[in-house]
Amino acid sequence: MPTLIELSGVKKVFGSGPEAVHAFGPVDMTIEDGEFISLLGPSGCGKSTLMLMIAGLLDTTEGAITLAGRRVAGPQTDIGIMFQDNTLVPWRTVRGNIDLQLEMRGIDPAERAADVEELLRSVHLEDFQARYPHELSGGMQQRAAFCQAMVHRPKTMLLDEPLGKLDAMTRENIRSDLQALWMQKRPTVVFVTHSIEEAIQLSSRVAVITPRPGRIERIIDIDLPFPRDFEVKSSAAFIGHVRETQEIFRNYGVI
C-alpha cells in the first residue's frame, strides 16, 4: 500500500529555556493508506501530541509531517477527528449533530442522507437519531460522535482515546463496531490508546511509544485475521503480542 502519512524528524518541545518540556520525538515513521495503526504508550508520553501535529492543530518544533504528499502546515479539513470527550452540541439531536458536520463543510445534508442512515445503522443508533445527547448513554454519545467524524467520507481518521471513559462492556461493543466500519470503509486510522489489548485487537500495526519524551521503541506488525473476535483474542498469537508489548513497558518501568 502507498504511504499516506510520513513523519520526518518530528519533535515537539513546549516552552523555551530552562522551563522547556521535551514532550515528543524526534521520530521518523510512515503510515500506509488504509491501515489501522495504534499509538500505544503511557500517559504523558506524547501520543496525543503526535496526533494533534498530524491533524495540523499543533505545530512541530522540528521536522515535517506530510499527509497525502502535502506538508501539514495548518489544520487539516479533509480528515475525521474524534476525542475522548465528544463534540456533540447539546441543542441538536443525534441526526442534527451529524448534519451539522456537513453544513459546516458546505455540503447539503440531503446529498448524504443515505450515508447518514447507513452510519446510524452500523453503530445501532437508527432508533435514536431524534434523541438529544443528554438522553443517550456515554457509549451512544461516542457512537454518534463517530458518525459525526465519518459522515464526510474522510480518508484519514484520527481517534484520541475515544473509548477511554467507557465501561468495559461498552468499550468491547464499540470496538467491534469500529472494527467492522474500518473493514468496510478502509479509511486510514491513527488510534491513540494506553490499552495494550485494545491496540492489538484493532490494529494492523502498533507503534509502542516510550515514556516522555516519547519515541517509537518498536512497531509491531499484528498478523492476525479480522474480525478479531473472542476466539482470536484467546489465541496463542494474540497473547504473544500482549506479552511482547508488556515486556517493553516493563523494561521502562511503566508496568
Image: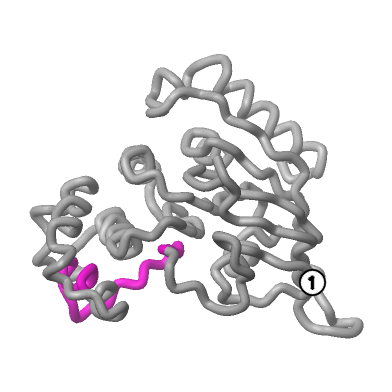
Residue at the (58%, 68%) spot, across then down: 52
Is 123 a magenta residue?
no
Mark 1 Cα within 10 Å, few/some/many (few <14, many 20+)?
some
Which picture quadrant has residue 73?
bottom right
Q: Residue furthest right?
A: 18
Residue shown at 80%/74% (left/top)? 21
Question: What residue did someone put label 1 on?
Answer: 62
Count of numbered marks: 1
Kindly state the secondary structure of the residue where label 1 is placed.
strand
Whether 198 is drawn above or below 239: the answer is below
> From where the camera sits, is residue 212 visible?
no
Q: Is residue 125 left or right of residue 4?
A: left
Write the residue at 18% across / 77% down. Answer: 92
Q: Position of residue 70 (x, y in %)?
A: 59, 67
Which residue is the extreme one toward the top? 236
Q: Tell me the quadrant of the picture where the N terminus can be found.
A: top right
Q: Which residues are magenta?
A: 80-99
Residue at 14 percent across and 55 percent down: it is 117
Q: Position of residue 44 (x, y in %)?
A: 68, 61
State the image coordinates of residue 55 (x, y, percent, origin top left).
Answer: 54, 68
Give, as a three-letter code, the residue at label 1. Glu
Q: Is residue 243 above or below residue 250?
A: above
Is residue 31 shown left or right of residue 186?
right
Front in this rendered view, residue 93 or 119: 119
- Answer with left or right where residue 231 lies relative to residue 8: left
Looking at the rendered image, the quarter that the C terminus falls into is top right
- Whether 88 is drawn above or below 29: the answer is below
Residue 6 occupies quadrant: bottom right
Q: Position of residue 74 (x, y in %)?
A: 57, 79
